[in-house]
Amino acid sequence: MKIAVIGAGPGGLYAALTAARENIQVDLFEKRKVGEGIVCGECIFDSLDIMTRPGRGLLHPVDEIVLKGRADYTFPLSRHRKLWMLDRRIWQQELARLALSLGVHIHENAKITRGLLRQMQEEYDWIFDASGAPSVTSRLYQFSGEYFKEYLLAYQLVLAADFSAFWPRIKVAFFPNLPAEFQPAYAWVFPKNAGRANVGVVCTVRGVLSKDRLDLKKLLADALHAEGLAEAAILERGSGVASTRMMPRLVYDNIVLIGDAAGLTSALHGGGIDMACLSGVLAVGTVMGGNSGVATYEEKLKQYVKGKNALEAVAIRKMRTLNFDQFDVLLRGVTSRGKLARFRTALNHLDMFYVTMKWFGTKKPIPDWPV
């Protein structure tokens, strides 16, 4: 079997590594250098409870998240799901080195056009498209608009400043005056260390030609001022989009979509590293079963993300239907150290309590990770 992987992000690298360990011939194509062009908070949230601890590139585990409403509320999320702060450049370069040692042929600065993709379909048995959103495949098969029916739009800065008050926690700050149609929306501060952090804002957008988008640069400037970071030195800037739903179709002839190309990003927070890695591993397993195996790919993914998606849908509904003071009460109750306060919050939000218990309590079989 001969496989091509497009994109050397987490999903593409995990697919390449998994295939190589099965003695499959793999060519991996990356349009830049491996580890370049990353616009991400660089924090792995293991929402599915399936990831192994990252190796080289791991900066530190994240034990707590600070949720800011009217006040700051600390939540020990790592008791339920693991979080790790990464240097993704180093992490992905290390994965690429491992892939090379297993015989993967990595082609950097190799942009895949529609015409080239069509030629590759004749040369390779299977192609894994991990090229992001919109994907290379979407341009060939003309479904790029699917990524923009509803998506998260993010703007991020990498800052140098004194982050000792934040580190090693991460912070998410919700906005008090944004209309429901932009929710979820928030600012984040993800410190890599006490002197450097990824800081950004994200909001929901409906329709690629929407004229009512928020001014994310102004929103971020306001957030930086509120956190006392207005004078921080800007080291990098970037922006990106993340679809808020799985694509309606994941297989096009002998092309399989994985990661962001498949729309496997969280509708609540835009994260998707764990789902990208999972999709890469599952994609290899399904193509090894031929066409009948590939037919099970979408359903296998849905079984993994079912509980997570249910919880996120409820959380998003709360953000869109509660006024900010009501949402602040919810944040305060969820993060309270008092059992009575948490119990009262559960009674007032039984829908959230039910899906949270399902999410925390459901264990899925862990695939054979390549690293």
Image: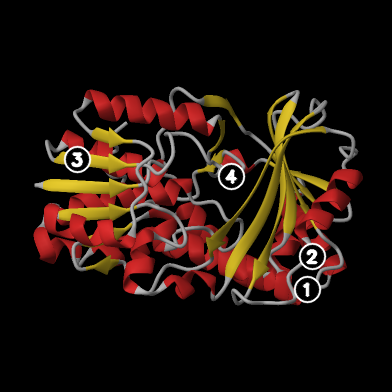
Q: How crowded is mark 3: few (under 14 residues within 10 Å), some or many (20 or more)?
A: many
Q: Residues within 10 Å of mark 1 (few under 14, many from 20)?
A: few
Q: Nearer the viewer, residue 1 or 84?
A: 1
Q: Name the residue under label 1.
A: 322
Q: Residue at x 23, y 33 (%)?
A: 105
Q: Residue 49: x, y in percent?
A: 44, 45
Q: Mark 4 points at which residue?
A: 39
Compute the Cα span from label 1 to label 3.
50 Å
Compute the Cα span from label 2 to label 1.
6 Å
Compute the Cα span from label 2 to label 3.
49 Å
Query: Which amino acid type is shown beneath numbered disc 2?
Result: Phe
Q: Residues within 10 Å of mark 4 (few under 14, many from 20)?
A: some
Q: Do the residues labelled 2 and 1 touch (CB within 8 Å)?
A: yes
Query: Which amino acid type is shown beneath numbered disc 1?
Result: Leu
Q: Is mark 4 on a helix, strand or loop?
A: loop
Mark closest to the chain's N terminus, 1 or 3: 3
Labels 1, 4: front one: 4
Q: Which residue is drawn at 11% across and 56% down?
A: 289
The mark found on residue 264 in the picture is none
Mark closest to the chain's N terminus, 3 or 4: 3
Q: What element carries label 1?
A: loop
Q: Mark 3 points at which residue?
A: 26
Residue 118 in the image: above or below residue 222: below
Q: Are marks 2 and 4 in contact (CB under 8 Å)?
A: no
Q: Is residue 123 visible?
A: yes
Query: Which amino acid type is shown beneath numbered disc 4?
Result: Val
Q: Mark 2 points at which residue?
A: 327
